[in-house]
Amino acid sequence: MKILVVGAGAVGGYFGARLAEKGEDVTFLVRERRFEELRAGLQVKSLHGDITCSPRLIRTGEKGTFDVILLSTKAYHLEQVLEDIEPFVATDTYILPLLNGMAHLKQLEQHFGAERVLGGLCFIESTLDGKGHIVQTSPSHHLLFGPLPGTRTDRLEELKQHLTGTAAPINYSDTITRDMWNKYLFITTFSGVTSLFRSAIGPIRSQEEGMMMIRRLATEAKEAMERQGAVFSDGIEQIQQQQIAQMDETMKSSLQRDMEKGNEVESAHLFGTLLSKDEATQVMLPAIYANLKIYRMSRKDV
């Protein structure tokens, strides 16, 4: 199967490189600046083994169709990405997004049809260094994918054979919708508190007040998601509280790292969509959303 990875950044570049390392037919759709960076090769520095490869690169406007398109872009780039990938979508193409949250699914289904859209998520801590190399630092580096309601399933078995079996755990899930809600709850809690306090998780977790705010945010987010039809694994709050308690104290969310770099952030996609008009039921979510809006205002002034 022909695989198109949209973007060769910290996430798409990592999983695309692992698939290429396995021997899969992988192409990266990249912007001009990244195209020039990668002409000398794609380099990954990882706890799980380094990779250096010569990736197949294309830019928007080129021709060809693909069997699966892996989307690893930020939510604020999605509108442009929909236009960029349209020429590469064939009748039987699958589109596999790895974006955080859930709102992007509706956009993709409206644009390409529900039958083409898969569910997907990943857990990984990775970033680009000053040379454009991917630096992957977390023990976790796994990806899940699976069918959503309405997804065409005729080629899923073939897709599984091509995506699984890499040095990074890429696994199929029959419960991908639930898995995505679980991830959304986790990332909302983790990125919310770390971006609010501008701190790694350790110092926040060490304070009684910090733990209280983590628990309050998780409860608010879960209730907001349930109002949107979310279904979670049993005991998910307790499970995720334990996960947060066991994280390395230096762990930062990607949202926080974006703020430290002065980059755009996915504030509306992750938090704005969860805000309720009933202000009495929410405290932490509005505070975090306001914090991100203030950051975005200050960023525009730079």
Image (tube, rainbow, N blue to C red):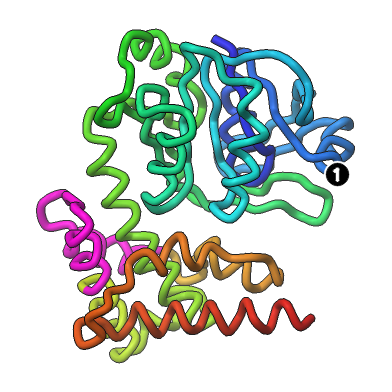
Q: Is residue 190 magenta?
A: no
Q: Nearer the viewer, residue 179 or 92?
A: 92
Crowd tier of the residue under label 1, counting other residues whose Cα lies within 10 Å: few below 14, some 14–19, many 20 or above: few
Residue bearing the label numbered 1 = 33
Q: Is residue 48 left or right of residue 60?
A: left
Which contiguous range is marked in magenta?
220-247
Describe the element under mark 1 as helix, strand or loop.
helix
Q: Is residue 301 above or below residue 1?
A: below
Q: Find residue 98 and report its horizontal and vertical position in percent.
A: 47, 41
Amino acid type, label 1: Arg
* Majority SS type along the magenta span: helix
Q: Is residue 282 left or right of residue 195?
A: left
Residue at 29%, 76% in the rendered image = 217
Residue at 22%, 81% in the rendered image = 278
Query: Which quarter of the image is occupied by the C terminus?
Result: bottom right
Q: Is residue 87 above or below residue 10?
A: above
Residue 178 position by quadrant: top left
Query: Which quarter of the image is occupied by the N terminus?
Result: top right
Q: Nearer the viewer, residue 14 or 73?
A: 73
Q: Is residue 31 left or right of residue 189?
A: right
Q: Is residue 234 magenta?
A: yes
Q: Find residue 7 and report its horizontal and vertical position in percent.
A: 67, 38
Q: Nearer the viewer, residue 49 or 75?
A: 75
Q: Is residue 27 above or below residue 38?
A: above
Residue at 40%, 68% in the rendered image = 271
- Identity of the residue furthest to the front in this view: 110
Q: Find residue 33 and report its horizontal and vertical position in percent.
A: 85, 44
Residue at 39%, 53% in the rendered image = 101
Q: Find residue 172 and report its horizontal and vertical position in percent.
A: 33, 26
